[in-house]
Amino acid sequence: MAERPQIAILGAGIFVRNSYIPRLAEISDLFILKAIWSRSQESAKGAVEIAKKFFPEVECKWGEAGLDDIIQNSSIIGVAVVLAGQTQVDMSLRLLKAGKHVLQEKPAASSISEVETALSSYNSFGTTLPSRPIWAIAENYRFEPAFLESKKMMAEIGDVMNVQVIIEGSMNSSNPYFSSSWRRDFTGGFILDMGVHFIAGLRMMVGCEITSVSANTSHIDTTLPPPDIISSTIQLENGCSGVFVMVVSSRSPKVLWRVVGLKGTIQVERGNKEGKHGYSVALFTAGGQSNSWFYPFCGVTEELKTFLSDISTVTLKKNQSYQAEPRLSYLEGARDIAVLDAMLESGKRQGAPVQVKRF
Ligand SMILES: *[C@@H]1O[C@H](CO)[C@@H](O)[C@H](O)[C@H]1NC(C)=O
Ligand SMILES: *[C@@H]1O[C@H](CO)[C@@H](O)[C@H](O)[C@H]1NC(C)=O
Ligand SMILES: *[C@@H]1O[C@H](CO)[C@@H](O)[C@H](O)[C@H]1NC(C)=O
Ligand SMILES: *[C@@H]1O[C@H](CO)[C@@H](O)[C@H](O)[C@H]1NC(C)=O
């Protein structure tokens, strides 16, 4: 049997407990979970208790000393960083510098200036480390079959004329992330934290970049951090235009992408079928014909599998010529931030057109 990579998780919050641990448990034969770390002992212990059911060997680590144990232990080759959005980049860089492969939870950074410093630090490791560790961003949408399939269907709709992304979220007090303290203090609010997913979905489908935006932002639901509403026009590098609308909390949630081409339209919409949450993809073609398919969510699992396979190939099989999966790269996460950062900037300037920074 092939050697399994050993990994650690930094963070013990809701997302680790409700998403990372159960998804990792489904693929527990692919790796060894060595440790879960948190700033506080109590929080680390809480997550370790949940994880022990699936990973009886997992160790509980906390504080600076616990972090050092993880960093110093060369048998741990990969680390998932699932911390407050404001601290993730610093932590990821610290681990990368120590030679660990990192899977950082989105968003890739908390601002465009943080993206720039992050990329220049990471690129500088290329010259100081024998080989640069992988820095992956967990955003999962690039791994959802709905987006992979709709990307393949793009050829059937001919030249793209227009794109529409309409998001009405359900971030109200019933949502476990609603009161999460770091999200309350995050510049860009839930628009940046959640919005990267929707931009990732769009970029993935159309396979081309957004070049400039003009947006109005507002803050109407004061139970949410600002801004909670954004209406943006977007310009794509293929010459077509579109709209991106996001309402963080709505009474009638809707998550929808439409790409309108000369010969047809592709629509992706969140929904559920037979008790499973996922996306339905519809293809409308000439003569009023339409076909639709339903794809249950599996992006988080697919993404974790890809990261584990990448780090095994690079470190355990020592294949240095191997290219890590580009859909997981820090750059892709950075590009999603760049689009939202431009929209938020335009919103601050009453809708003035803003160029999206290229990475
Ligand atoms: C690192 O982990 C290995 C394998 O679990 C363990 O045997 C070893 O004691 C650890 N080393 C340090 C320095 O903590
Ligand atoms: C929050 O939104 C969900 C989904 O729309 C809804 O079922 C729930 O009743 C809402 N809760 C509150 C407190 O408004
Ligand atoms: C290393 O990775 C490259 C690129 O993916 C692949 O072509 C090659 O076969 C791999 N080499 C080994 C020894 O697995
Ligand atoms: C929205 O953008 C338009 C066009 O730039 C601008 O005239 C208007 O003042 C903006 N509205 C708000 C509420 O910022």
Image (spheres, grey):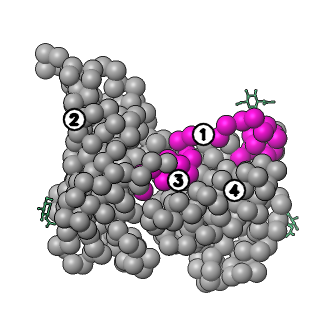
Q: Earlier in the sequence, mark 2 or mark 1?
A: 2
The residues tagged by marks 4 and 1 sit, at their Cα atoms, a distance apart of 21 Å
The residues tagged by marks 3 and 4 sit, at their Cα atoms, a distance apart of 22 Å
Marks 4, 1: nearer the viewer: 4
Marks 2, 3: nearer the viewer: 2
In which of the image's four quarters is ligand 3 placed? Answer: top right
What residue did someone put label 2 on?
A: 162
Disc 4 residue crowd, few under 14, some 14–19, many 20+, Cα 10 Å: few
What's the residue type where badge 3 is placed?
Ala
Which image quadrant is residue 156 in? Answer: top left
The residues tagged by marks 2 and 1 sit, at their Cα atoms, a distance apart of 29 Å
Give coordinates of residue 117: x percent, y percent: 57, 63
Which residue is located at x 58 percent, y 56 percent?
A: 119
Q: Secondary structure at mark 4?
A: helix
What residue did someone put label 1 on?
A: 325
Q: Secondary structure at mark 3?
A: strand
What residue did someone put label 3 on?
A: 138
What residue did someone put label 4 on?
A: 124
Mark 4 and mark 1 residues within 8 Å of each other at the beta carbon: no
Which residue is located at x 35 percent, y 24 percent?
A: 153
Disc 1 residue crowd, few under 14, some 14–19, many 20+, Cα 10 Å: some
